[in-house]
Image (cartoon, rainbow, N blue to C red):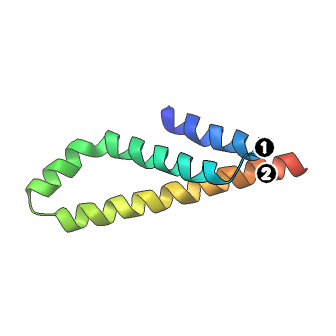
Amino acid sequence: MLTYLAILTCTFAGYAGAAPLSIGLAAVALAALSYAEHARLYRQADELGLGDVVEGVLWRSLLNSVVAAAASYGLGTLLRLA
């Protein structure tokens, strides 16, 4: 539920014409929420010696967060301009 709130907040930031810095803030929030949700699995994988795999997963999660935040900010901007 918090992830949807972060995305919605970023959309409203785009609608309000806030600085694009809100994309980065929303991306960090989304990545942190994703990490918190799967932290136990990451620790178990790290204990099994799969640290490189976990690191790759975390980078891809951050990239997905940036894409989701940028898309929601762009949607808010489009709604403001329409």
Q: CA distance from mark 2 to mark 1?
A: 5 Å
Q: Is residue 81 above or below residue 67?
A: above
The location of residue 62, given as percent across then percent down, is: 44, 58
Which of the labelled discs sits on residue 15, or is there none? 1
Quick one: which residue is furthest to the top in this view? 1
Q: Is residue 30 above or below residue 20?
A: above
* Residue corresponding to mark 2: 77
Q: Secondary structure at mark 2?
A: helix
Residue drawn at the location 55% of the way across and 46% of the way down: 26
The location of residue 15, given as percent across then percent down, is: 78, 43
Q: Earlier in the sequence, mark 2 or mark 1?
A: 1
Residue drawn at the location 52% of the way across and 51% of the way down: 27
- Asked whether the residues under the numbered discs 2 and 1 touch, taking CB atoms below 8 Å apart as contact, a structural biologist would say yes
The location of residue 34, given as percent across then percent down, is: 39, 45
Mark 1 surroundings: few (<14), some (14-19) or many (≥20) residues within 10 A: some
Q: Is residue 35 left or right of residue 10?
A: left
Tell me the amino acid under the disc marked 1.
Tyr
Q: Secondary structure at mark 1?
A: helix
